[in-house]
Image (cartoon, rainbow, N blue to C red):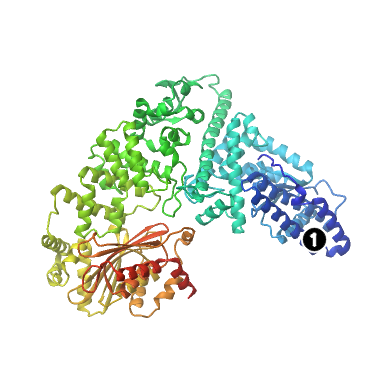
Amino acid sequence: MTEPVITDQRAIFDRREIASRIEALVEEYGDASRQPVVELLKQALDRGRGEMERRLEAHPSAGHAVAGGYSFLVDQLVRVIHEYVTQHTYPNPNRSAGERLAVMAVGGYGRSEMAPYSDVDIAFLVGERRNAWCEQVVEAILYLMWDLGLKIGHSTRTLDEAIRLAKDDLTIRTALLEGRYVWGDRSLYDEGEQRYTSEVVRGSEQAFLTQKLEERNARHKRMGDSRYVVEPNVKDGKGGLRDLQTLYWIGKFIHRVSSASELVDAGLMTDAEYRSFRRAERFLLAVRCHMHILTGRTEDRLTFDLQRQVAERMNYADRPGKSAVERFMQFYFMQAKRVGSLTGVFLAHIEDDLAQRSARKGFFAGFKPKPRMVKGCRVFGGRIAAPSDDWFAKDPVRLIEIFQIAEAEGLEIHPETMRQANRDSKLIDQAVREDPRANAIFLDLLCGRNDPEMVLRWMNEAGVFGRFVPDFGRVNAQMQFDMYHHYTVDEHTIRAIGLLNKIEKGELKHDHPRASRLIHKVGSRRVAYVAALLHDIAKGRGGDHSVLGAEVAEELCPRFGLSESETELVAWLVLNHLLMSHTAQKRDLTDPKTIEDYVAQVQSIERLRHLAILTAVDIRAVGPGTWNSWKGQLLGELYDASSERLRLGHMRQGRKEKVAAKKAQVADVLEEKAALVEEFGTVLDDAYWIAEPVDIVALNLVHYADARAQEHQLSVHCEFYDARGATLVTVIAADHPGLFYRIAGGIHLAGGNIIDARIHTTRSGWALDNFLVQDPHGAPFREEQQLERLKKSIADALANRIDLTPRLAQRPLPHSRSKAFDVSPRVLFDNKASNRFTVIEVNARDRPALLNRLARVLFESRLVVHSAHITNYGERAVDTFYVTDLTGDKLAEGERRNRLEARLAEAAGDAMQARLEDA
């Protein structure tokens, strides 16, 4: 875009020296000189690359200089190759008017923005018509470049063809727009540039803008449609290099600028914006160059494993509460955010400019509609704007107010006003933060009924949000370095507020029916919105973010204007915002002690309602696919059981009454097969009847009756279970030690992930085990062949037809990138969480068949597993087991428990996985 300054060019490629050595090789080898020339150029290319790598190592952020250096290296190669081919391979001293050839750099090469393994995009421009000499030269140049191992994108066109195609094809039009002369016939290139301006550009500016923006929006959608995805695409992602290039393309096409710096002269950017444009571009180019060098290939996705390595290469260091990689990625997202802000302002100028051009020519030339005024702001064409350049300076509270008006009135903020707000955000000082009017306005915006999510995002991009709420500013662009969270902390928080707004408006009734009801029953809707804002506010501070966040809430809520009771409730919600999801996903909800302990912490219906709403939006705002019907069902069960306990002061029914009620419900479901309840009612103990839902009991009884009638020693039933978004796998077999871990192994071998397991033994010695299973992407198995594969794999595992251990070790993790994270195994024992069982919780890196390995250790330690609950947080798995010893007692503290802890940690650890893979 702006020609980079390449220092000490001969250290990269000394063209004069290489040309003279080629002449010597031609003299020595004659017609057989091609191979020695290729070897010479290979050495020169390797030396040039090595020099650029050294420069990047010495100056890790010098994106422009390094990208320009690689382009210079290719330029020099192309030039010596062109001279070699035209002078020695196909010399033609008396060329006709048609035998003209110009070599153009296009694409990233044309912009002088090449990473080490970027494609070399070349356009060959020929004279009046195609001819044999031009074709021979082009072919010879390409073959030499291919022999050097370069990836070439190329085209050969006459001038007429190039102009005709550019009119019809956006890609070709863009390629020629940034075409750069490299070598050959300069007058032919200049003629093409002149014809491009007069025949392609003139009159098609509006069409080009529209097509480019459509292309950009489609690209963003493919890449996740957020600049805050935690594994961003540096080139094509939102806020990446392609967005900067799009600005330049549009500016160059419409204003015919030749470099990005001329965008300032055209009035499309201020000097400060141009500097931030270049700063973001320099950083992104440097990151991309580091990624190419690390991977040895064209790599544009900044994956978790690369993030650590690039952060190290760019000299980022750990700081208290924030690792080097998190600091690096926070800076990355700050640059992506800046690109977004620049884009908004830039496009507004372009649109205004084109509109003015059109108005000057049109029927209504000279007519200007009058804007309306809203609280002193100008509103025109659906946009709100500050009436003067010093409007915010006169009263900085207006920096908050203009966003609140935009939300209340359903308006966009004019990009010029966004630019002003960004410039003047520094006017927000402690006096403004403590101003009751400013805080009341902010609270109205936060709890807005139209679209607070969008407006808060604008407020964040303008830098106003972080200045007014400095604690929020601290998590701005802060990455959460794990595979569970898809977005930065600020983006996750703003999305959670948006989801809360949609739930309140009834737009998510299907997915969140309970939260959609509860939001209209809570005593204070302000509490719900402020809790959503503050639940992750203290992330990255080096301590428990829930505890630290509750302290922040106690300070901020009175400032916002919340009452003492509202403040207490928000602080409690922030402190306990993970309580409901952890209880629902990691504990046995049929164990009365689970509900007792949960209710003891919640203590009131109002807290319970708010926590249910906050939990739903928090999980869903993590990213696509993190909310599913299984989690919804678990949270619903916990809410209903704890709500009943809170309202009545006890559970509505005792154990005996619950079992009788469940049997009656099952009989109703079974209809003509209701007699099965009577027949097998006493074979299955009370724990089974309490633990399993009515619909699963009904299915189990039919399967159990069939298995007994046919005297099957093993019966495996698999079916898609819509209510939980999973596949229900029921195994009926003669009970024997090790049954659970073998079933788990069989399910894993079939490609299944177990998300819940309930293990039962009938009074007649049969095991009846229910598993809920999903594929590695969180979807159920539902195709017939998938269900058959599950059945066969379980049957083979139980019949010892396969050796589970080596087969399981060979299965790849669905998230192989999990190796980029440090997850040390942690084993927790809890004898207070259940009256009957010891609860064992194992936290570890997710890996193939983790559940199988842990279950095997429990079996070999002579423990009985009664239920298992499996939760995944990206790269981290939490497996919870409810166990007793063989006599039905809990596992007491002592040497046996210490040994078990060590064995479980070893089974979950990296060293064990490595040994299994080696075996």
In this rendered view, identify the residue nearer to me: 604 or 452: 604
Whether residue 501 is visible to the viewer of this picture, yes or no, is no
Could you tell me which secondary element the residue under label 1 belongs to? helix
Query: Could you tell me which quadrant the N terminus lies in?
Result: top right
Decide: is 818 above or below 210: below
Q: Check disc 1 and report the residue beneath it.
A: 37
Residue 109 spot, x, y in % from top left: 67, 48
**Residue shown at 36% from the left, 41% from the top:** 534
In this rendered view, identify the residue nearer to me: 551 or 194: 551
Decide: is 149 above or below 408: below
Residue 714 spot, x, y in % from top left: 27, 77
Residue closest to the far front: 894
Residue 594 spot, x, y in % from top left: 23, 57
**Residue shown at 67% from the left, 45% from the top:** 65
- Horizontal arrangement in the rendering, residue 810 relative to residue 91 (left or right): left
- Horizontal arrangement in the rendering, residue 536 relative to residue 290 (left or right): left
Callout 1 amino acid: Val
- Horizontal arrangement in the rendering, residue 307 relative to residue 296 (left or right): left
- Horizontal arrangement in the rendering, residue 645 relative to residue 100 (left or right): left
Residue 114 spot, x, y in % from top left: 65, 49
Which quadrant of the structure image shows residue 667? bottom left
Q: Residues within 10 Å of mark 1 (few under 14, many from 20)?
A: many
